[in-house]
Image (cartoon, rainbow, N blue to C red):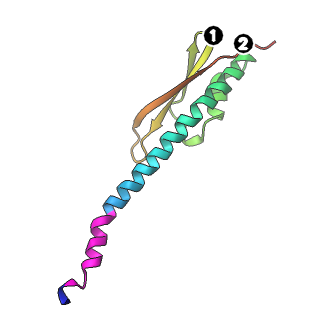
Amino acid sequence: MRGESGQASVELVAVLPLVALVALLLWQAVVAGEAASSVAGAARAAARARAVGGDALAAARGAVPAGLRRGLSVGDAGDGVRVRLPVPVVLLGARLGSFSASARLPPQR
């Protein structure tokens, strides 16, 4: 019994890195999900802005949360727009991949 006095503390210290890794992976999944759900709204906003003669990039940036705006790009997709939104890695400044969406709206007069 005397040799087991600190066993619970040692087991907790051994499990903490695993708990931290799981929390980090869950947070990364949340960031990727937010990017995936935001890109379609950004494409629609960019298409609306272009249809009325406005700034498509500014409209797309306004439709995306501030933490995801870095690297956002808007380009032509035939008669519409294509928005590409990179997914940032939570701990590093790198990119994990990107999501893209297109939208089309005829010019409004």
The amino acid pointed to by label 1 is: Asp
In the rendered image, which residue does mark 1 sit on?
79
Quarter of the image for residue 97 reads top left
Our reading of the magenta stretch's main secondary structure is helix
Callout 2 crowding tier (Cα within 10 Å): few <14, some 14–19, many ≥20: few
Q: Residue 54 carries which label?
A: none
Residue 32, horizontal then vertical, whole percent: 48, 40
Q: In this image, 5 relative to 92: left or right?
A: left
Residue 84, horizontal then vertical, whole percent: 52, 26
Secondary structure of the residue carrying tag 1 is loop
Quadrant for the C terminus, please: top right
Secondary structure of the residue carrying tag 2 is loop
User: Which residue is found at the position 57% from the left and 36% from the top?
Assistant: 37
Callout 1 crowding tier (Cα within 10 Å): few <14, some 14–19, many ≥20: few
Quick one: which residue is furthest to the top in this view?
78
The amino acid pointed to by label 2 is: Pro
Q: In this image, 82 relative to 13: left or right?
A: right
Q: In this view, does 19 lie above or below 2?
A: above
Upstream in the sequence, badge 1 or badge 2? 1
Identify which residue, 102 or 46, lies in the foreground: 102
Q: Can residue 46 be seen in this view?
A: yes
Per the rendered image, the range of residues in magenta is: 4-16
Q: Is residue 41 above or below residue 30?
A: above
Identify which residue, 47 or 1, lies in the foreground: 1
Residue 39 within the segment the image draws in magenta? no
Q: Is residue 26 above or below residue 46?
A: below
Residue 12, horizontal then vertical, whole percent: 31, 71
Residue 6 within the segment the image draws in magenta? yes
Q: In this image, 3 relative to 103: left or right?
A: left
Quick one: which residue is furthest to the left in this view?
3
In the rendered image, which residue does mark 2 sit on?
106
